[in-house]
Amino acid sequence: MVEPATDTIAATKLVPLLKDELDIVIPTIRNLDFLEMWRPFFEPYHLIIVQDGDPSKIIKVPDGFDYELYNRNDINRILGPKASCISFKDSACRCFGYMVSKKKYIFTIDDDCFVAKDPSGKAINALEQHIKNILSPSTPFFFNTLYDPYREGADFVRGYPFSLREGARTAVSHGLWLNIPDYDAPTQLVKPLERNTRYVDAVLTIPKGTLFPMCGMNLCFDRDLIGPAMYFGLMGDGQPIGRYDDMWAGWCTKVICDHLGLGVKTGLPYIYHSKASNPFVNLKKEYKGIFWQEEIIPFFQAATLPKDCTSVQKCYIELSKQVKEKLGKVDPYFDKLADAMVTWIEAWDELNPAGAPAKVSNGKA
Amino acid sequence: MVEPATDTIAATKLVPLLKDELDIVIPTIRNLDFLEMWRPFFEPYHLIIVQDGDPSKIIKVPDGFDYELYNRNDINRILGPKASCISFKDSACRCFGYMVSKKKYIFTIDDDCFVAKDPSGKAINALEQHIKNILSPSTPFFFNTLYDPYREGADFVRGYPFSLREGARTAVSHGLWLNIPDYDAPTQLVKPLERNTRYVDAVLTIPKGTLFPMCGMNLCFDRDLIGPAMYFGLMGDGQPIGRYDDMWAGWCTKVICDHLGLGVKTGLPYIYHSKASNPFVNLKKEYKGIFWQEEIIPFFQAATLPKDCTSVQKCYIELSKQVKEKLGKVDPYFDKLADAMVTWIEAWDELNPAGAPAKVSNGKA
């Protein structure tokens, strides 16, 4: 049986890497007591809290954390009519935090994720591992059988082309979960007691041309390299679907990373996922996605972007056109989503004008 | 520091899976004392020993093992002029063993590979893990972030298309190495003391469209599904290159598996690789390969096979034509290799006529 770490204070002395270059984005509807456990690891960093649901509710944040908090009223005020692209009553709202951040890196985590322990019993500083992942290159063009060749004690194996050993810049670091695995509703229903107890001590690059199911629970990315592709779509209130926000972002992001020659890593770090969400509620949110994904994934597998798409924004707008053209036939929802993708980029560019970072204030930070 | 297991006898009671359906192929130039350590795991199986070098030398095999042994004279006698496709003075000669086997599965291992221990100190039955890998499906069409979804305690994660959950048949299981990693000569020279001590508790499918450096030290495959692609090329005596035998087989095999919808897995099991080969000798063998691979890998990455290539043999012959056409320009060696690929298939089909397995005897088994 795996258990979360309880003694995070005693964890190794911290060197808060990238302290002024990384924001932690947390979507929530409740008081952020879970931060107590993360205090030794997160306290040096700035938090962006995106409050979902009723804006009149007061979210308590433990003392000592540096944060800004946005509720729905803030989002509406800052984005005006473009706020329509930000989901409501769904953790997809977190992507608003990516947009208002002015930092180079984003780490996002769910409020039911606790500190996991490695096999020696030591509390895992997930953020530190993400930073290691994102600051070292990826190897998307050829597979290395000893996993991450840049890690201490590892290297490229015999037969790995020398011309590819510089690797590619890493845009995304996708972390995993001990205890409650990230299963869909049907699998949750079939295996209610399954827990992930296997600690796989590896980080690997997802090869170019291969899609993967990106989970938003424990995720880090380089905003400068890929930020505008990290749109979590239209989910929750008023939408026919939920729980596909991170998947959508993952598919779009991977296609664009492949096009731009950027790397996506998965594996370490683990967080401890404490609580399985209700599988019946999940099934209701997911069921359209379960059959839509059978058409969405082949669409993304076949998607190619023209050479003149040299920025993430250009790639994303092009992808939105292809979504409208190809997936619009699957359901009118994708027409609406394609429009929201364009709105998202417009809003992103408004808040992040090239060369002169916009100053955003909600009066609460 | 990792050490090999010493107490293999005490390892769990064995169920010799696939006892009558799997041959163990071992290329060697020396007495096979290393088998003592593997006795509890290998003794139930039939061994095919391919003796390299001087055929007059007597290779001692520990008592109690069921084996057949082929030296160069046997190879010449059995294959006649087609014996030219089998390398001499190079472990590439092992592929002769694949050809004369009449079993469905092959496990091949080097004679400097010992039994490794898992993190709990238990001796690892590498063959048993390979059999598990090869008897369960692969997932080449979409990446599963929790690694092998068929393993106990694991499954497909949220967002994995249900239509792909049956997976593909597994053709190859590629195992790894603790202690001496499989590095090329330049890396050996630069990092003479590096040892692989990291036990990564994972098996994963190498995605469709992704090439990998296949090492022949600890390898299992389904002869019926992919056997004729497991040609280890022209290496060693009279050839300008060595140590690319398994790489060549891996590139060809992966392209053909991708075309035929078959899966290739890598990860567990580990063996304990005892002795680093001489990096100076290796550099001499490898140096042409080191620059040739810069052209070979893009060639294989771009290679496509026509739809009418519905058998491994047809795929392999087609690939030999493409090798001649595209790589012949790199060096005349590839012309010769392309011809040897054809000879290999002719010899394979001669020894393995469809429907009626050939009876091969060397009078020593």
Image (cartoon, coloured by chain):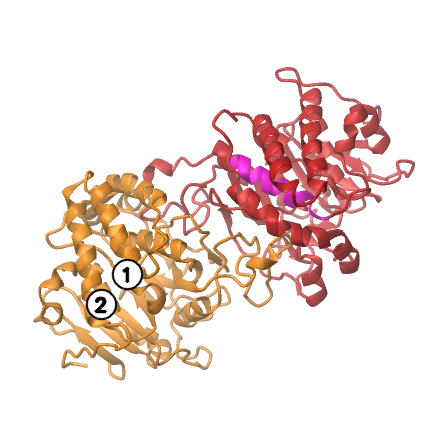
Chain colours: A orange, B red
Question: Which residue is at the front of the view, B242 or A248?
Answer: B242
Which quadrant of the view contains residue B232?
A: top right
Say whether residue B274 is left or right of residue A18.
Answer: right
SS class, disc 2: helix
The x and y percentages for residue B260 are 50, 31
Q: Is residue B240 magenta?
A: no
Question: Residue at point 25% right, 77% down?
Answer: A357
Q: Position of residue B235 (x, y in %)?
A: 75, 42
Q: Are marks 1 and 2 in contact (CB under 8 Å)?
A: yes
Residue A86 picture location, percent across and down: 16, 61
Query: Can see residue B258?
Result: yes
Q: Residues within 10 Å of mark 2 (few under 14, many from 20)?
A: some
Quadrant where the image shows the N terminus of chain A: bottom left
Asked whether, in this view, residue A172 is left or right of residue A36, the answer is: right
Look at 22% across and 43% down and name the residue there. A325
Q: Secondary structure at mark 1?
A: helix
Q: Outermost residue, bottom direction? A: A64
Q: Chain of mark 2?
A: A
In the image, what residue occupies the spot 67% across and 22% down?
B349
Position in image of residue A192 (x %, y %): 31, 47
Image check: B259 left or right of A258? right
The residue wearing badge 1 is A313
Dot 2 amino acid type:
Asp
The circle on residue A61 is: none
